[in-house]
């Protein structure tokens, strides 16, 4: 019903300005990440694109500056599948940036063949969850000093089909690419929830969201039959500009200032799965994440 109601709502828009604010967006050289960057740059923010492929990132920077008329847009190297790269990126940000008002954890891999990150994590949980967990941990003090600030985790409705396999988080016993993707997206929802609890009273708020079924590069690992079904559904899918709207909504909508830990879709609050509201599971995932990354984050 929520989806049906949202279909007939007027499109969300806001003229909020972000002058003097700094945003980091992971995976911002393509798709909804790039469209988010263009929008925030138009609002006056300093935008840092955190990307693995620097050639594509540099091309995106040029395009974003041209589209927005804001030349305070830069790119920096970040490979979320390698904790060394994440630590180097965070060190640069902490050293050179006076503030960080928006952290948008947007990058992701989707239904890819089985692979491992540099740290030995299954690729989807490694990039989509562990990488962003570590990045957020390393930037959290700067974010708190910049309050009011927001942390946004791009999840997916696929989280509803997911479960967290605490005993086999890296899918070593058996690998199903769709289940592993859904697990990683559920982890985004749970991380957002746990983070909100820990940040109560700091002026830093957290949001997770479903961008819609967006036509992006993420589809590159889909099989022929999967692509066929998506082509049938194409009239109901979104382009990258439409797909970025809920991220932008979570980043700038004034009425969300006091909200934290929730899940959003179509620029409105939405219902996540029962597992996505399971505080006990969220806590167990938090503890496991700290253990896997050798962190202490209470």
Image (tube, rainbow, N blue to C red):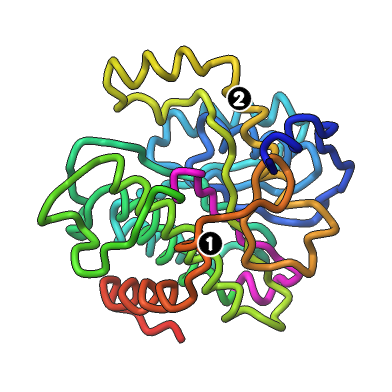
Magenta stretch in the rendered image:
142-159
Q: Residue furthest front?
A: 1
* 206 displayed left or right of 191: right
Q: Residue furthest left?
A: 173
Considering depth in this image, is 70 or 273 the residue closer to the camera? 273
- Membership of 298 in magenta stretch: no
275 relative to 153, above or below = below
Could you tell me if the residues under marks 2 and 1 are in contact, i.e. CB atoms within 8 Å?
no
* 152 displayed left or right of 122: right
Say few, some or many: other residues with alpha carbon within 10 Å of mark 1 (under 14 / 14 to 19 / 20 or more).
Answer: some
* 167 displayed left or right of 263: left
Image coordinates of residue 240 in percent, x first then y, are 60, 27
Give the secondary structure at mark 2. loop
Image coordinates of residue 6 in percent, x first then y, are 74, 37
User: Residue 71: which quarter of the image?
Assistant: top right
User: Residue 146: which quarter of the image?
Assistant: bottom right
Q: Quadrant of the N terminus?
A: top right
Give the mark nearest the N terminus, 2 or 1: 1
- Which numbered mark, 2 or 1, is in the foreground of this view? 2
Q: Residue at x 69, y 80 (%)?
A: 202
Image coordinates of residue 290 in percent, x first then y, are 34, 76
| Residue pointed to by mark 1 | 93
Considering depth in this image, is 145 or 212 the residue closer to the camera? 212
* 245 displayed left or right of 232: right
Q: Say the numbered circle drawn on residue 238.
A: 2
Q: Between marks 2 and 1, how big is the CA–CA gap?
A: 33 Å
295 relative to 260, above or below = below
Q: Which residue is drawn at 33% across and 71% down?
A: 289
Give the secondary structure at mark 1. helix
């Amino acid at each position: 019903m929520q989806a049906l109601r949202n279909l007939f709502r007027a499109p969300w828009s806001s003229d909020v300005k972000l002058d003097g604010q700094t945003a980091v967006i992971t995976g911002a050289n393509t798709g909804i990440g790039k469209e988010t960057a263009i929008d925030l740059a138009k609002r006056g923010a300093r935008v840092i694109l955190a990307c693995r492929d620097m050639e594509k990132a540099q091309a995106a920077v040029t395009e974003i500056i041209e589209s927005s008329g804001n030349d305070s847009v830069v790119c920096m190297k970040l490979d979320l599948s390698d904790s060394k790269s994440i630590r180097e990126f965070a060190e640069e940000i902490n050293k050179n940036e006076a503030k960080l008002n928006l952290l948008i954890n947007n990058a992701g891999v989707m239904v890819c063949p089985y692979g491992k990150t540099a740290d030995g994590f299954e690729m989807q949980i490694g990039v989509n969850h562990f990488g962003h967990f570590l990045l957020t941990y390393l930037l959290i003090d700067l974010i708190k000093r910049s309050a009011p600030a927001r942390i946004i985790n791009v999840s997916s409705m696929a989280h509803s089909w997911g479960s967290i396999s605490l005993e086999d988080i890296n899918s070593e016993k058996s690998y199903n690419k769709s289940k592993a993707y859904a697990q990683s997206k559920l982890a985004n929802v749970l991380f957002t929830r746990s983070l909100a609890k820990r940040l109560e009273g700091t002026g830093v708020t957290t949001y997770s969201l479903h961008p819609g079924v967006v036509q992006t590069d993420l589809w590159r690992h889909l099989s022929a039959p999967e692509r066929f079904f998506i082509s049938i559904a194409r009239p109901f899918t979104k382009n990258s500009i439409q797909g970025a709207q809920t991220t932008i909504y979570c980043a700038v909508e004034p009425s969300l200032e006091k909200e934290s830990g929730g899940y959003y879709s179509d620029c409105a609050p939405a219902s996540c799965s029962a597992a996505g509201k399971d505080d006990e599971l969220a806590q167990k995932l938090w503890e496991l994440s700290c253990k896997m990354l050798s962190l202490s984050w209470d």
